[in-house]
Structures are given as structure tokens and as C-alpha cells.
Amino acid sequence: MKPYQWQMVVILVLIPLFGIESVALMGAAQGQLLPEGTQRSVGTTVQTSPIPKTADTLKSRLKSQLKRKQPPQLATTPPPPPLARDYASLKIVPHPSGGMYIGQYEWVDGDIAMFEAAGGRKTALWSKHRGSWANGYDESGQPHFDVAAANRAWQEGKVIVVQGYNVHPAPDESEAPAGFTVDKLLSGQYDSDLGRFASELRQFGKPMFFISGREPNGIGADYFGGFGPVGDKSLLWAIQNKRGLAEFDPSQMPYASRLYEGVGKPAVCDGVERLKAAQRYYYDFFVRREGLKFLTFDTMGWNVRQIQQIDYDLNDFPSTIDKTYARQLLESCHSFANFYPGDEYTDWVSLTFYLVDYYAKDLPGLIRDYVISVDEHMKNLDKVMNEVKLVASKKPVFFMEFGFPDGLRQDSSWAAQKITQGFQRMLASYPQVHGFAMWSAHPSWMSYFPWDCLVRPNTQQGAALKATFAANPARFHSCVYLSDGKLHPNCTN
């Protein structure tokens, strides 16, 4: 065989083994692919090794030559360190997989620890270091924020809740200055003190819930946001004087053009319109003006009432009232659509939902017991959730106050049954509910709130709660997610 024919044979063997580029490279190296005695040019003989007898030998030799021809490795730049999380610009968001954040209030030392022991799960919401929104008010009704306590709560992996002034303008309201009204709030009269409170919150600078008031159509329904020309009159006054409508006009208030569009309608309950305006004012003041972007706003724990509750309410008013006018006003005041501040001004819809019964021995004036089925309670919730869906369909829902009490009984099979059935219904029917904060009890409340909601270990309620958590481990969460898509930094579920 002629020399150039040996060359072609070798090349044809190498190409399938190494690819054409590698063969070209190695063929150029020292003329190794030329057969023995082949002339590189006239008069020059190249001395080469004999042609390998097997493909394996040839493959080994060529790999060795290729390794000697590798280019030098270039130095690589290490990737930049990850950016630190800016907690001052983050909010609390629902868990990405759905389900509910676990929460518990602490009105008496040890409430949260007792609830956690009962259910076998840690709470995500509220902390023994700050167990409610009501911490820190002085005797004049001014809020103060304990930054050190809030940081201890953050270090244990929990989030907290704060409140400015409760926008309930009753004379005995302890969470606002004497003589507080929503109208004074909107006029800027309290801006200096609120600015001081904002500075305290800024020192903490981490995500937390902000509530504008508590249960406005429940415990706060005696005033809502106030009636009359200056907002200092009660619901009873408004009904007796037929002056519950068309006396609130925020159009002359500061910032009116950007804050109160659609507020002040003459056919809508003045008390609930003031609540809408107050929520917008708080958001504007703390977020836009003070720059506290870490506040997560909710809707004050709008109360889940019985479907026919207005009929009961009418019977509680003096017989001299105009019941037609009273019904018209009550229906307007208890409309969630009239109350809702708008998507721009809230992050979560918060509700208050207690599955309570009414016992004559606990409630003076009641002549018989009223035990309400879980099914009836859920129908009440259905009604409110449908109202929420009409105006806030994109917002997550949270039970700001929540409980399954059986009067004052601490160990009750009926309360345990309500826990089991209630959670089953909510998990099956309401995926938009993403959290709850269980209520507890304080001895000083028993005369007017005779329901013990705290779930304790070694009770039937505790066993029902633990079984519910155990049966649905992925639906209950002990750590919150923040708006950057990551978990609370100090928490593991």
C-alpha cells in the first residue's frame, strides 16, 4: 500500500474515535500521522513512530498528545455575594403552597406556650414578647413601641401586630387620646404623635401587621367610626335622631383629592364611611409619608355575624325608634362593600370569627341557652366571604380573632367537635384563608365576654387541635413568607 493510502486509513480510523477537529490537531503535531519514511518536502525525511497496530493503542497515544496541547486554564472571577435582604421594604404574604399560618394571642403570660403545647406546633403569629396590638399604650392613650421586645420576637422567628389609635371614637376607648374622633385624625391633629410612633416602628424596621382598629362591626358597632357633624356621636344617637347618613364629607380634609374618592356618599352609613377614610389615612401617613413599607395592613377584623343579626339588633333598641329607618341604616353600616378601603390600602382582608354559643348562666338577661351548630356558623361565614369576594377577590383572608369556645369550659367535647369540624370545612371550602390568630381569655373580661377560647394541653380541645394539625401537616404553617418569596430568616417549619 502506498504511503498516502496508509495516511487515509489512519485518518478514517481516528475520526469516529475523536472527531475531526481533534484529528486535525494531532495530525499537525510533529507529523505523527505520516507513515514512516514519508517525505514532508523534497529532500527531507521525517522520522516517525510506526503506525499503531490497534485502535486502542492509537487512541491512548493520541489522548496523551492532546493533553499536552491543552490551552492554559484562565482564572475565573468568583460570583458576587448574595444581596442582603432589605426587610424594611418587605411585607407578610401568604404561604406559597397555600394553607394557614398558625397564630395565638397572649393576654396572660404563657398563653402562647400553652397553645403550642396543646397543638404540637409553633405559632408564626404573635409572640410572648408582644402578644397583641394592645401592648404599649400609656394612660393618655398614646401608643409606644418596645423595639427590644419586638426584636426578641423576630429572633424567635415570629411576626407581631401593632395599632396606632383605635378608630373607635367611644368616650371610654383606652387605645386613643381622650376625645378622639376620626375627623380629628383626618385633619392632621394627631400627626405629631403618630410621627413619633412611626419613628419607633422605623427603629425596628421589619415586617409586621398593622391594624387600624378592632372588630368595627362587632365590639365597635356602638359607634363604628362615629356619627354626627364632627363624628363624636353613637349609633344609637344616629338612629334616634335619624341622622346616620349624609353628615360626613371628607372633601375639605387635607389630601382629600388623593385619598377620599368615592367616600362621603349621602346614602351610605356615615360611621362606616369614616372607617373607610381612617384606613386610607393610616396607610397614606405611615407608608407614603413616613416610608414604613414593612407594614402589612389588614381590614380591622370585620366581624362574622349571624345572618339574621340585624333583626336581633333592632329588638335591642328602644321601642320608640323608627325601625324602617334603623334597618336601612344598619344594613348600610354592616355592608363590607361600604367599609372596604380598596385594594390599594390593604394587604389582607381580616375577619373576626368566633363559633360561640350563648348560655343563660353566663349572660344576664338571657332566659335560655342558644347552642349554634357548626353548620349554622359556617353559613354565617359563607355570607361574609361572599361579600368579601365581591370587592376584594384578590386579597388573602386572615382570621384576626378566632375561637371555638364552649362558654367557659376549659375541657369540652363540644368545643373539640367544633375545632375538628370547623377546620375541616374551612380547609375544604376556603383556600383563600391563609391564617388565623386564636383568642384567649383575661379574667377581667368574664363579665362581658364569657367565652374561654384558649386551647390547653391534656384537654379534649387540645387533642382535637393536635389531631387536626397532624392530619394536615402541609396545610398549617409555623413560619411566614415575606414578599421577596423567602421565609422569615429565623424560622423553620
Image (cartoon, grey):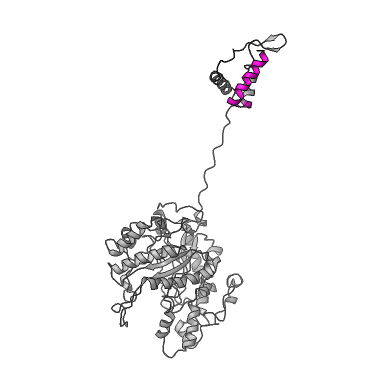
Closest to the observer, 197 or 8:
8
Above or below 292: residue 320: below
Apparent side of residue 408 relative to residue 176 in the rendered image (left or right): left
Inspect this view and state whether residue 239 appears. yes
- For the point 58% across and 31% down, the residue is 74
Residue 201 percent location from the top left of the image: 47, 61
Does the magenta-highlighted stretch encompass residue 188? Answer: no
- For the point 60% across and 26% down, the residue is 16
- For the point 61% across and 12% down, the residue is 48
- For the point 42% across and 72% down, the residue is 379
In the picture as drawn, the residue positioned furthest to the right comes out as 42
Closest to the observer, 439 or 60:
60
Residue 343 in which image quadrant: bottom right
Above or below 43: residue 467: below
Residue 405 percent location from the top left of the image: 33, 70
Q: Magenta part of the protein: which range?
A: 3-21
In the picture as drawn, the residue positioned furthest to the top comes out as 43
Closest to the observer, 126 or 386:
386
Magenta: main secondary structure equals: helix
